[in-house]
Amino acid sequence: MAGGKEIRDKIKSIKSTRKITKAMQMVAASKMRRFQDRMVAARPYAERMRRVIGHLAHAHPEYRHPYLVTRPEAKNVGFVVITSDRGLCGGLNGNLLRALTAKMRERDREGVGVRFCSIGSKGSVFLRRVGAKIVSNITHLGDTPHIVDLIGVVKVMLDAYKAGEIDRLYLVYNRFVNTMTQSPTIEQILPLPPEAGLGASKGHWDYLYEPDAKEVLDELLVRFVESLVYQGVVENMASEMASRMVAMKAASDNAATIIDELQLAYNKARQAAVTQELSEIVAGAAAV
Amino acid sequence: MAMTIHVDIVSAEAAIYSGVATMVFAPAAGGGLGILPRHTPLISKLVPGEVRVRTPEGEEEYFYVSGGVVEVQPHVVTVLADTALRAKDIDEAKAIEARERAMQLLKDRKENVDYARVHAELLEAVAQLRTLQNVREKLKGRV
């Protein structure tokens, strides 16, 4: 029975692989739902904050915060790159990093300096390999990312922006469109683009400030940028889970196909062996 | 019916409370703040403490905030709560940490473990493919 045992072993091994991919698929599906909830939960904060900042900008049109002013020339730019910590999530990180690489090349041609803040180990490994300038880094945020963990990495970039070391800051992450689609996104977060809705709103009043307008606005804007990054992190995690779920589903399906094929091969091999044995016996009997 | 004011308490990670109140107390930077409906517009930093919301039913709800900003408009109070203690030096320390992690990452050549693992995985995949091919060929030979 040539090959019979090998095929059986192979089937067994693929079956256990399929068990793993199925389990991962299920885990990813439930985690994805959790992250989607977190995405939704984080939205009101950004919205309210946007409104308050809009009010402030309206009440104080003469004071332009550096975060809101576009510098004419971008000599140096910063990227906050959000990737996943773990692999086995399809082309998620690959696509994102490819989009980033294209952007980097473009900047290189223009002679613009770039520096990076990396969130997530896949991005860190990639950026280190290409020899990029990483100024801040955090990995292994776990299943419940907290904004506390992001304060440091974001501050490094905000400080650089304030000091004029970078003139633009971009956020690079996977936007969660739906379970099947996650799109690599590069978004400008500093200076805050006007479409962020930070412009003046209707109606006129002025606030009482405690302690004073500039300080309050400064705090608000820092938190606003942090919340944008946090939103990016959560969205990227939801994308990671969705992508992993789809990848693992494909893997399980493929495993099933291979098992079917192998099963057929095994049956044929067994049948061939039986036939051969029979004909040998018959031939033997005829010779006697 | 008593006059009420709408209250929203949100943090970056979740919406904490939304409802109406007859009075709201907030730990403003300049001292405790009691906000009644039709309060004049005000915006203030918060210090760690508790936000109290008195509902029209006369009950009081308590929320701890570790800082943030409160915006008051005549009919709306918005509390943008921090989820963590914030202070200049704490933030600074975190920034330094993040920077050091980046340095560590660039210095640390030992992380070749990652490459080693990827390499091993690749070898395994290649071996599996080869087995599969062998099986297929055998199959073809037989048919």
Image (cartoon, grey):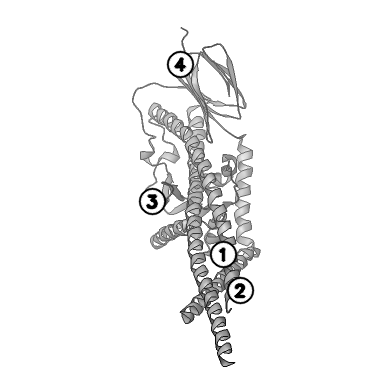
SS assignment at label 4: loop
* Closer to viewer: mark 1 or mark 3: 1
In the picture, the disc for residue A14 is 1
Query: In the picture provided, is A152 more to the left or to the right than A193?
Result: right
Residue positioned most to the bottom: A287
Q: What separation in Å lies between label 2 and label 3 (alpha carbons)?
A: 69 Å
- Please give the chain letter of the residue carrying mark 4: B
Mark 4 to mark 1 CA distance (whole Å): 70 Å
Residue type, mark 4 in image? Thr
Return the x and y of residue A207 as percentages of the image width and height.
45, 22
If the image is split into quadrants, where does the C terminus of chain B sit? bottom left
| Number of the front mark, 4 or 1 | 1
* Helix, strand or loop for disc 2: helix
Category of crowding for the residue at label 4, using alpha-carbon neighbours closer than 10 angstroms: few (below 14), some (14–19), many (at least 20): some
Closest to the camera, between mark 2 and mark 4, is 2
The answer to which of marks 1 and 2 sits earlier in the sequence is 2
Label at residue B40: 4
Nearer the observer: mark 2 or 3; the answer is: 2
Q: Identify the residue position indicated by label 3 in the image.
A: A73
Type of the residue with mark 2: Lys
Q: What residue type is labelled 3?
A: Glu
Front in this rendered view, residue B93 or A99: A99
Residue visible at 62% across and 68% down? B116
